[in-house]
Image (cartoon, grey):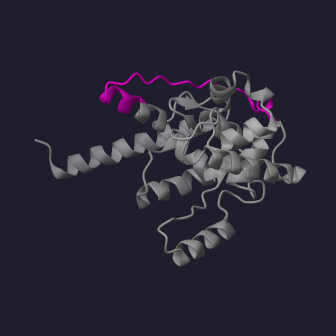
Amino acid sequence: MLTLARFARRIFKFFLWLTAFMLFSLVLFRWIPVPATPLMLLRLAEGKQHGQEHRLYNDWVPLEKISPHLIRSAIAAEDQRFMEHYGFDFEAMKKAMDYNRKNRAGRTRGASTISQQTAKNVFLWPSRTWIRKGLEAGFTLLIEGIWGKRRIIEVYLNVIEMGPGIYGAEAASRAYFDKSAEDLSARQAALIVAAFPNPRERSPENPSRYLKNRAQKIARMARNLPEEAYPHP
């Protein structure tokens, strides 16, 4: 008979082993490519559940094989203070809170850094619960301390969702422009980044007027980024 005490011990052991596994993975991913993320597996399961063929296209490439245009565009659009903060941009958080408090149109603005997005993508499930946000904060601090900025942006650009079944810079470059990630032009890189907020609905290959305008803005911001604002391949 399973008593309450024995059940509690089993739960405690489960979470202890899970924590150990996650920390081991975190250290391991400092050096080796991330094979899959929870979001990739979730999308795969969703496709099978609806009887759809859903393949994962994710060709890992080192940062030096990714166009500097894409690195600058991602940082310009997602986290311009990436090299300055330690995982959290409190200035951006304050601005987002002020905007969301004043905005009455129902639109909200986020303030997640690239470090936070990477922690969420690699280790956690997609949700907006406080538990998930708390774990995200913990993993963000850990990857900032163990991985460093260069590795964080490298992982980010290799695992982020960039289209239906498309993850990472190399897969997106091949799918949309039939070229490697290191050969992306400034315009192509900006188009890929412009689709980040909704990559399954927006196509860099056949961009809408909105996507073109957003890409132009991102390309302009990327050109204006100072050299110290991004890690160099």
Depth check: give the residue in front, 95 or 144: 95
Q: Is residue 213 visible?
A: yes
Q: Is residue 32 visible?
A: no
> In the rendered view, does 210 fall on the left or right side of 66?
left
Up-down relation of residue 75 to residue 85 (above or below)? above
Q: Residue at x 51, y 65 (%)?
A: 107
Q: Quadrant of residue 89?
A: bottom right
**Is residue 51 on the magenta stretch?**
yes
Depth check: give the residue in front, 87 or 94: 94
Residue 156 picture location, percent across and down: 64, 40
Q: Residue at x 52, y 65 (%)?
A: 108
Looking at the image, how many numbered discs can be counted on the residues? 0
Up-down relation of residue 169 to residue 193 (above or below)? above
Q: Residue at x 38, y 29 (%)?
A: 47
Give the main secondary structure, helix, strand or loop, of the magenta stretch.
loop
Furthest toward the front, the residue is 209
Q: Quadrant of residue 85?
A: bottom right
> In the rendered view, does 45 fall on the left or right side of 215?
left
> In the rendered view, does 163 fall on the left or right side of 222?
left
Depth check: give the residue in front, 117 or 13: 117
Q: Residue at x 69, y 45 (%)?
A: 212
Residue 149 picture location, percent across and down: 74, 46
Furthest toward the left, the residue is 1
Residue 165 picture location, percent across and down: 51, 29
Furthest toward the bottom, the residue is 102
Split into 4 quadrants, where in the image is the N terminus?
top left
Residue 104 picture location, percent across and down: 49, 75
Give the magenta-colored segment's residue range. 44-67
Split into 4 quadrants, where in the image is the C terminus?
top right
